[in-house]
Image (tube, helix red, strand yellow):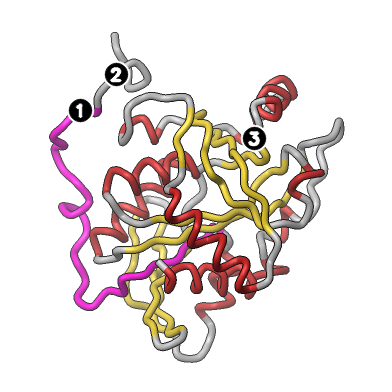
Amino acid sequence: MRTIFQRTEISEPVLFGPSDTTKRIENFPEICISTFSENIIEKFSSLKGVEKIAELYSANGILPVYKIRYKDKEIAFYRSMVGAPACVSCFEEIGAMGAKKFVLFGSCGVLDDDKVKDHIIIPVSAVRDEGTSYHYIAPSPEIEADPHSIRILENVLINCGYSYVKGKTWTSDAIYRETCTAIKERRQEGCLTVEMECASMLAVSKYRNIPFIQFLYGADNLSSDTWEIRDLNLYGLTNAEKYMVLAFECGIAM
């Protein structure tokens, strides 16, 4: 038996795709922003002038898709579901609605606190320790981010005056199986962070040829002998405006 982890090529064609399940929406904004924090989405969806323009459906319920005007640009935004398969499914359906450029941001576990500190993290590549990316890109230990997207993100961060660090991230499917041995190995391989979606999102955006930017901010700390939860349970609310404005600026610059 050969699973997706052993195949050297991606099987085609598909029986059905996102356009078969999701209707295209007239005048859907070209730029779409997403994050995982309900707190951040609630904060921005309640702003004056923001309107709901669509909905994403699943057995988990309905996810509203909103539209906001920023610097005379209409930008869509919504809350992504946590985990590679759910996050990618949302992305696929948003693309079917009409989005052409995509920015994603979210929290991550910190594997190297000395390097990350309070910086924004730019993932330049991701270790593929999940399954979803293998359905879009042939097997490999890692997947690299698009250099052009990295340069755009760097320029935005510099122009906004925020410090950042570039490095490798570890994308894992199992949040409660980040074992001490695995953490040590990934740190030795140069990973600064751990999260659950980056490798898969890099893969699907490459497959669909959609310009994609992702940045991360540190939440819990896994770089010492004792796990530190830090502001993980705040879900990004402390710096909500900072992160969303950065995402808006990246979208406009793409």
**What kind of element bears circle 1?**
loop
Counting residues from the start of the chain, the first of labels 2 and 3 encountered is 2
SS category of the residue bearing label 3: strand
> Label 1 sits on what residue type?
Ser
Tell me, yes or no, if residue 39 can be seen here.
Answer: no
Residue receiving disc 1: 11
Hey, what amino acid is under mark 2?
Answer: Arg
Left or right of 117? Residue 249 is left
At x 31% / y 71%, what residue is drawn? 30
Residue corresponding to mark 3 = 191
Pointers 2 and 1 in contact (CB under 8 A)?
A: yes
Question: Mark 3–mark 1 contact, CB under 8 Å?
Answer: no
Label 2 to label 3: alpha-carbon separation: 26 Å
Q: Is residue 143 visible?
A: yes
Q: Which residues are magenta?
A: 10-36
Packing grade of label 1 (10 A; few <14, some 14-19, many >=20) is: few
**Residue with the mark numbered 2:** 7
Nearest the viewer among 116 and 244 is 116
How far is mark 2 from mark 1, CA to CA? Answer: 9 Å
Which amino acid lies under the numbered mark 3 shown in the image of this protein? Cys
Quarter of the image for residue 106 reads: bottom right
Is 198 left, or right, of 229 in this rendering? Answer: left
Q: Which quadrant is the N terminus positioned in?
A: top left
